């Protein structure tokens, strides 16, 4: 049986690219893209059933509420999707590789050429929900 990877946010720009190019970068893997149409990641029970059913060997988490205006209009929804969902998926994936994509919006843009060790300084809600992972490990 081929190892199985899940890519969340499969309808988004990066997730869709990863799903479409998976045969090239992950030959021999069964790569399954999950979009909002497939699975509501805020439905914890359904997500857990899906993880038990799919039994992934790796997860690439690309799903997010990334539209800055939507995050500003509903910060609680942004936190639910960008922080709580990510923490839940990380917990479910604690024994397998879990790749989480962040955003340059965790920085204020004053310096540029940021690295992994640079301190975040987000200027909007979307950046704040992404920066929460850089400051401390996810807790669930």
Image (spheres, rainbow, N blue to C red):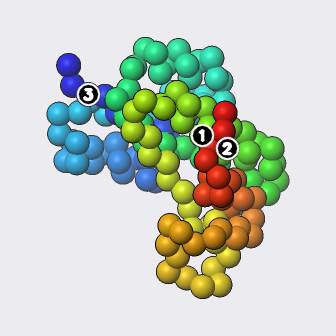
- Which numbered disc, 3 or 2, marks the residue that appears first in the sequence? 3
Left or right relative to 21: residue 40: right
Q: Nearer the viewer, residue 126 or 136?
A: 136
SS state under label 1? helix
Sort mark 1 into few (<14), some (14-19) or many (20+) by Cα contacts within 10 Å. many
Q: CA distance from mark 3 to mark 2?
A: 27 Å
- SS class of the residue under badge 3? loop
User: Residue 105's spot in the image, x, y percent?
Assistant: 63, 67
In this rendering, the answer to whether 113 lies above or below 66 is: below
Q: Position of residue 15 (x, y in %)?
A: 43, 47
Q: Quadrant of residue 46?
A: top right
Q: Residue at x 35, y 48 (%)?
A: 18
Indicate the position of residue 98 as horizontal and vertical percent values: 44, 40
Q: Quadrant of the C terminus?
A: top right
- Residue at image mark 2: 83
Q: Nearer the viewer, residue 13 or 101?
A: 101
Q: Which mark is residue 86?
A: 1
- The residue sitting at 31% across, 28% down in the picture is 4
Splitting the image into 4 quarters, where does residue 47 fall?
top right
Give the residue displayed 46% in from the left and 53% down from the top. Answer: 13
Q: Are marks 2 and 1 in contact (CB under 8 Å)?
A: yes
Are circles 3 and 2 on residues that touch, CB within 8 Å? no
Q: Establish if 128 lies above or below 119.
A: above
- Residue 133, labelled with which disc? none
Q: Earlier in the sequence, mark 1 or mark 3?
A: 3
Task: Read off the residue under disc 3.
Answer: 3
Image side of residue 116 versus residue 41, left or right: left
């Amino acid at each position: 049986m081929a190892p199985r990877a899940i890519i969340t946010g499969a309808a988004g720009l990066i997730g869709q690219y990863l799903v479409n190019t998976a045969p090239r970068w992950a030959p021999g893997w069964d790569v399954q893209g999950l979009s909002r149409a497939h699975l509501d990641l805020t439905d914890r029970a359904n997500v857990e059933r899906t993880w038990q059913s799919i039994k992934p060997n790796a997860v690439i988490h690309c799903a997010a509420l990334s539209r800055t205006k939507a995050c500003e209009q509903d910060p609680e929804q942004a936190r639910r999707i960008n922080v709580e969902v990510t923490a839940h998926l990380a917990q479910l994936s604690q024994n397998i590789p879990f790749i989480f994509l962040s955003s340059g919006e965790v920085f204020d843009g004053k310096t540029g050429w940021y690295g992994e060790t640079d301190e975040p300084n987000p200027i909007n809600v979307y950046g704040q929900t992404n920066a929460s992972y850089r400051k401390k490990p996810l807790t669930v």
